[in-house]
Every structure is written in C-alpha cells, then in structure tokens.
Amino acid sequence: MDYQVLKTEIALPAYVAMTDVEIAASINTVNITRARATLSGSEILNATDSGEFTGLTDAQKSSWLAVCGVDEINTSTGIAKSLEATLFGAGTTTRANLIAIKNETISRGTELGLGRVRAGDVIHARNI
C-alpha cells in the first residue's frame, strides 16, 4: 500500500465529510471504465463468434488462429488490430465482443495502484 498516494487522494474535497469506512468504500467502488492496453490470445479467441469464424476462408481462419495464439495483443494498434478489422468488420458480433472485452470496470483504488483499501489504511494515511 502506498500510503502517500492514499493520503493525497483522501485530501481531496470529495472525501472531506466522509468517515474512514465511507472513504474506503468509496475508493473500492467499482465504477471507473478504462480501456485495457492488451488482451490475451485466449480472450480474443473466446470473443470470436463461431458462425462468423466458420464463414472465413481457410487462409483467413489460419491467420486469425495465429493471432489468437499470441500471449499478449495490443488492443489499439498493430497487425492484430488491422486483421480484426479486415476479417470482422463493423457491425459483426466478433467486433462488438472485442470492443466489449477491451473495456474493464475498476475501482479508484485499482486506478491509483492501491488495490483494496481498508478503513485502517485510511486511518494510517491520515496520520502520516
């Protein structure tokens, strides 16, 4: 736990009228959406619509499976992104699935790199 980061956070006006328990609950609330920088090949394969995949040519299937075999794939640029757009254009289920899994909902604590914050953490941060 980086108590200095927590101390800076809880000094914000949004937390002034809150108890230590309320601050911890607020920081732990999962309500922030962020785009993931990478996805695993397995996640991409599992998001692929089977009907759309079946409709690909053998060469296209092979290319897509090669992408899905990569451990970590950049979600915003690169050949994998280009191939996704080529094989599964706008309006396809696969494309919609990939857009959906690219985004994740996290807590403020996760966003700050603190993980789960407890009331005791807040008390400690106030006193440093």
Image (tube, rainbow, N blue to C red):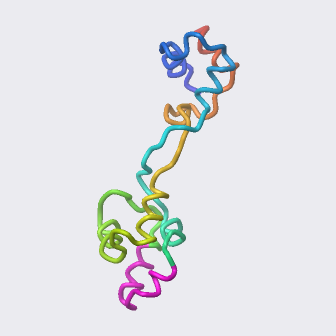
Quadrant of res 92: bottom left
Residue at 47 percent across and 87 percent down: it is: 54
Residue at 45% across / 71% down in the picture? 93
Relative to residue 109, is residue 82 drawn left or right? Answer: left
Quadrant of the rendering where the N terminus is positioned? top right
Would you identify the image quadrant in which residue 106 lies? top right
Q: Residue at x 49, y 58 (%)?
A: 101
Predominant secondary structure in magenta? helix
> Is residue 59 in the magenta section?
yes
Give percent across and percent down for residue 32.
Answer: 50, 38
Residue 82 picture location, percent across and down = 29, 69
Q: Is residue 60 magenta?
A: yes
Which residue lies most toward the top here? Answer: 127
Image coordinates for residue 34, horizontal then vertical, percent: 44, 44
Magenta residues (range): 50-67
Q: Which residue occupies 32% across, 70% down?
A: 85
Image x and y of residue 88, in percent: 37, 74
Q: Is residue 123 above or below residue 34?
A: above
